[in-house]
Amino acid sequence: QLTKIIDPIDGLIPRENQTLSTQSDQFRLRITSLTVLLDQKRTRLQMQFANMETILAGLQSQQTALGQIKSFSSNGNG
């Protein structure tokens, strides 16, 4: 019975160790894969945020210009 458990080739413990090792390797690969995906998503979101900041700055500039035009037209009609 003990041989069935500890046999280095067909024993229960070595097989279980191999199974755990395989699962651990699969988890490491999955973590690596998810890390790459998260890095790609972070980069994409950072670019989108930077683009939105640029657009917002442009809109604020336009708002300021429109405010100045409105101010000039109000002064001219007064």
Image (cartoon, rainbow, N blue to C red):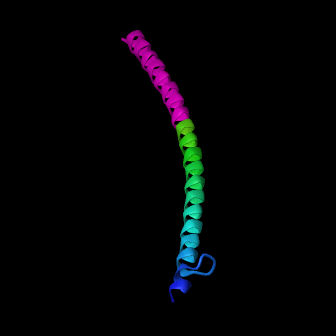
* Residue name at image x 58 percent, y 53 percent: 32
* Quarter of the figure with residue 43: top right
* Residue name at image x 54 percent, y 81 percent: 12
Task: Give the camera-side residue of 33 and 7.
Answer: 7
**Residue 61 in the figure: left or right of residue 43:** left
State the image coordinates of residue 26 (x, y, percent, origin top left): 59, 63
- Image label count: 0
Task: Give the camera-side residue of 41 and 6.
Answer: 6
Image position of 10 with respect to 75: above or below: below
Magenta span main SS:
helix
* Residue name at image x 53 percent, y 32 percent: 50
State the image coordinates of residue 45 (x, y, percent, origin top left): 53, 42
* Residue name at image x 52 percent, y 25 percent: 58
Q: Magenta segment: does it hold 44?
A: no
Image position of 32 with respect to 55: above or below: below
Q: Residue furthest bottom?
A: 1
Image position of 10 with respect to 43: above or below: below
Task: Give the camera-side residue of 74 and 64.
Answer: 64
Q: Magenta segment: does it hold 58?
A: yes
**Residue 64 in the figure: left or right of residue 28:** left
State the image coordinates of residue 62 (x, y, percent, origin top left): 50, 23
Q: Residue furthest left?
A: 78
* Quarter of the figure with residue 64: top left
Magenta residues span: 49-78
State the image coordinates of residue 78 (x, y, percent, origin top left): 36, 11
Image position of 72 with respect to 41: above or below: above
